[in-house]
Image: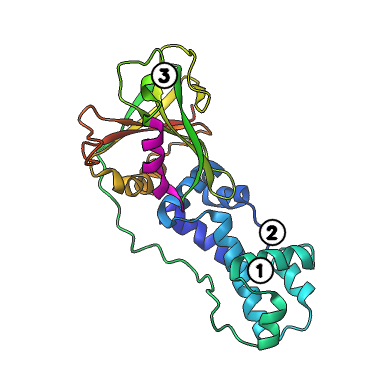
Amino acid sequence: MSIADKAVWVIERNSGRPLTLNAIAEACGVSRSHLANAFGAATGLSVMKYLRGRRLSAAARALADGAPDILAVALDAGYGSHEAFTRAFREQFVLTPESVRDRRSLDGIALVEPLELKATAERHLDPPHLVDEGLVRVVGLSELRSFETTIKIPAQWQRFMAYYDAIPAKLDRIPVGVSQPADDEGQFQYMCAVEVSAFGESPKELLQLEIAPRKYAVFEHRGHVSTLYESYSTIWNEALPSRGWTLAEAPTIERHNPTFDTRSGEGGLTLWIPLEG
């Protein structure tokens, strides 16, 4: 059973209890960051967005059945006030709890149903190798992303490359992608960057980042860049757990191969996954 499958089971079994990302990760036997990545890569959703959608869907069903006390429904869904529940309900369904109860119908409401992930095929990856990497300095364009907005990353790369020539002290390597650990909502900073030997005067729109020395598991992604998250899903859900490796709360680095073609997206990348220990 994959990490994402385990998380779905934990959520479905315990959705009526207080649940946090840390608690779900502990039940799955992985770190909070590992769970966020595994679930997001497999589903395109954050863990907490899925949990919130499942709880609000149960609330919608109760309201459509005529639940007399909206506050009681809100408390059952994990909200401490009528106002907070109404705000979340409207954001999820574009309707108020009162309107659903008044019309006694779920017509037109996109309920969040339990995910079924077991049919997801595992992508074949070559066995990884371990590397002790020293200090990495990068300069790049960092923007907030989520597992639902990764489609915007190619355009981010295009914007970054307009600054490329103005970055001093570049190492003799092609640009790299840097993903920070995801938060509880599945949001993470993604940086289109280039490695440098030292920080200099760069365009003000760019961020300078030092990544501390650590051990990495290095995986080869040989397919088209558009299938990158299939490799990530296999890494988070299968490859790391099967080897007993623990994901570190540190940036993941994507290094394009020398053969990578920016016009076609072919040529492959290596994925540097930070490990504890």
- Looking at the image, which residue is at 75% across and 68% down? 75
Image position of 231 with respect to 47: above or below: above
Image position of 106 with respect to 11: above or below: below
Asked if residue 159 is among those painted magenta in the image, a careful observer would answer yes
- Residue 236, given in percent of the width and then of the height, sits at 41, 45
Mark 2 vs mark 3: in front = 3
Q: Can residue 31 be seen in this snapshot?
A: no
Helix, strand or loop status at disc 3:
loop
3 and 1 marks in contact (CB < 8 Å): no
Q: Main secondary structure of the magenta part?
A: helix
Crowd class of label 2 (few under 14; some 14 to 19; many from 20; radius 10 Å)? few
N-terminal of the pair, mark 3 or mark 1, is 1
User: In terms of depth relative to the viewer, which is nearer, 11 or 112?
Assistant: 112
User: In terms of depth relative to the viewer, which is nearer, 77 or 92?
Assistant: 92
Location of mark 2 (residue): 18
Residue kind at label 3, given as amino acid type: Ile
- Looking at the image, which residue is at 25% across and 47% down? 124
Which span of residues is magenta-colored? 148-160
Residue 95 is drawn in which quadrant? bottom right
Location of mark 3 (residue): 167
